[in-house]
Amino acid sequence: MKIRSNRGWLLVLPALLVMAVNAFIPFFTVINYSVLDIFRNLPPIWVGLENYQVVLQDDLFRGAFVRQVIFSFLILFIQIPLGVLIALSIPKKGWAASASLVALGFPLLIPYNIVGIIWRVFTRSDLGLAPLILGVFGYEYNVATNAADAYWTVVVMDVWHWTSLVVLLAYAGLNAIPDAFYQAAKIDGASAWRTFRVVTLPRLRSVLTIAILLRFMDSFRIYTEVFLLTGGGPGTTTTFLSDVLVRKAVISFDIGYSAAFSMIYFYVILIISYIFFLVLTNVGTGSEAPAE
Amino acid sequence: MATIELVDIAHAYVPGQYAVKDINLRWSDGVSSALLGPSGCGKTTLLKIISGLLIPTQGQVLLNGEEVNHKQPAERNIAQVFQFPVVYETLSVFENLAFPLRNRGVADSAVQKRVNEIAEILGLTDVLRQNAAKQGTAEKQLISLGRGVVREDISAILLDEPLTVIDPHQKWHIRRKLKQLQHELNLTMIYVTHDQHEALTFADQVTVMNTGEALQTGSPRELHDEPAAPFVGYFIGSPGMNIFEATLDGDAVRAQQISVTVPQAVIPQVQGQDLKLGIRPEFVEVSLTQQPAYFECEVQAIHLTGTAKILELSGMGLVFKARVADTFRIETGATVWANFPTHTTMIYADDRAINLEAEAKPL
């Protein structure tokens, strides 16, 4: 072994240090906490995987987990098609294109907590605009007491806040498709839907993969806006995983439980994202293409 | 089989700025022809007008005598191959070739038969079951081509610089396939290119375009020997034609100290117009010794091309190029004698060739 060959480590050291502070140390701290039972003023007690067991059997966790999965898939089912649809309807050039993009960019520029407050004010039954307008149509809207109202308001808020991201990604993807593809499809006599299926969608694959992963991860971790809008209620209708976690960690100060919860949370996101990635990068690329 | 005719076609993308204008062209059945011109001269615009991707601002597109101006591209029985190969990447090679047939609801058995036939000609039989996206550029271009001709009712195929992105060693392969297809399916083929070599070796009939106008249509030989406009002379040939600014001087057209006598009948036609003299470097006669009617020149530079030498000469107030055999022994700075034979020297009035013999004859 030559000493010289170790010099390379010096070059990656700064990056390693940053990674350590940024990721490794917090990550391993959490792993450490997750196997301990911690009480104030007492030495921590090693409990092995007991915390994990407790979390997985906890109805609060299970309920929030199911709600979270349903919510994230609902968000994807709405935002991805809607985003692509809006992107398709934005003009390719001219002032209207720029104006549309700027308008769509607005929701993305607003901080999460402000979004929550905006929607809180917008939906309040005493002074909000939403109950007023819906009241005109004879619908008695109440986000604080009606579970259905609270749930779909959270969904609409997220759609309002984040669909633009999908639109911007899809729009960039659409503009990168050469005209020749559409001209060829036209000459080949393909219908608009067929053209979308064989030209547009495959060419949007990479941007949509990014869009789906980002939207899945973000919606799976949703916290601030919901907390400000409904506080997780009424009941547990809009109580998602982060909400449970924050209550356990910061309010009850149940560190072992929260650490185990975090680890499970983290791996669930990682595994589902990886499955998405595998499926999206391989769908439709098989050598035996479906003869539709 | 189709005869394609363009009558008085003009197109402006921006009102008032014509990309092509005054186009009157005719392509007969089963002819392989080329549209040749520099980038931005309107070749692609013309192609799109024929295929129906573009509706011309003015004029008529006739297919077998029938006006098709407002027919959709899919209804025109014309295929187009683009500069960059277009394949539907989620489909197999087979489904790519079958795509136009499936869109028209052709029965599966007929699709199978036809696709296999076309794949056979193009040499794609072995890869039919593979994914189209995984093929090389040359194969992709063959797939685009095959998709164009797979329809039995296809009568013409338009090729928009189809070899630009193909590796040099595969160009010949694709050209051979093109020729073969044209032959076996008896297609009218229009090949757009900016490469004179591609155009002249591929097509029986070449149309030269510049700045939106069709300058001349003819066989490669005609374009070489009798360019109808200075641009044609300059654009075709390597090096291009020598072109000199000229003036009318009595009964002769004069460029510096060189003059070409013109028949009396022609004089009124060229009077007051912008005159030019043109001669191809290969038609300039060069001698190492003084000869009657030859004039003295100085060799300014020599370019070697392998089989020939291109001399840059100056004499009689002109600087011009002459092409001589590689065996011609000469050095820079030497004195030679040159001659512009009358029958190969062209006279242009307002960028149109004046046919001296025909015009001289009394009507």
Image (cartoon, rainbow, N blue to C red):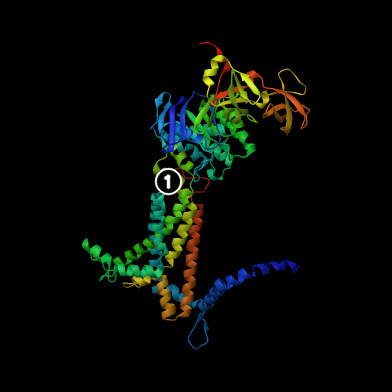
Q: How far across and down, in percent of the image, does residue B86 sit?
A: 51, 41
Q: How far across and down, in percent of the image, does residue A266 sit?
A: 49, 69
Residue B274 vertical placement versus A248 (above, below):
above
The residue carrying pointer 1 sits among few (fewer than 14), some (14 to 19) or many (20 or more) residues within 10 Å by Cα, namely some
The reply, left or right, for residue B67 in relation to residue B147 is left
Question: Residue B200 appears in which quarter of the rendering?
Answer: top right
Residue at 43% across, 59% down:
A165
> Is residue A150 or residue B95 the one in the foreground?
A150
Which residue appears farthest toward the front when viewing the image?
B250
> Is residue B116 or residue B35 the one in the foreground?
B35
Residue A96 in view of the camera: yes
Give the number of callouts: 1
Residue A76 in view of the camera: no
Q: How far across and down, in percent of the image, does residue B326 sit?
A: 75, 28
Which residue appears farthest toward the top when viewing the image?
B362
Question: Residue B233 appears in which quarter of the rendering?
Answer: top right
Which residue position holds label 1? A196
> Is residue A266 or residue A106 the one in the foreground?
A106
Residue B308 vertical placement versus A90 (above, below):
above
Callout 1 secondary element:
helix
Q: How far across and down, in percent of the image, does residue A201 sit?
A: 45, 49
**Chain name for mark 1:** A
The amino acid at mark 1 is: Phe
Question: Residue A249 appears in which quarter of the rendering?
Answer: bottom left
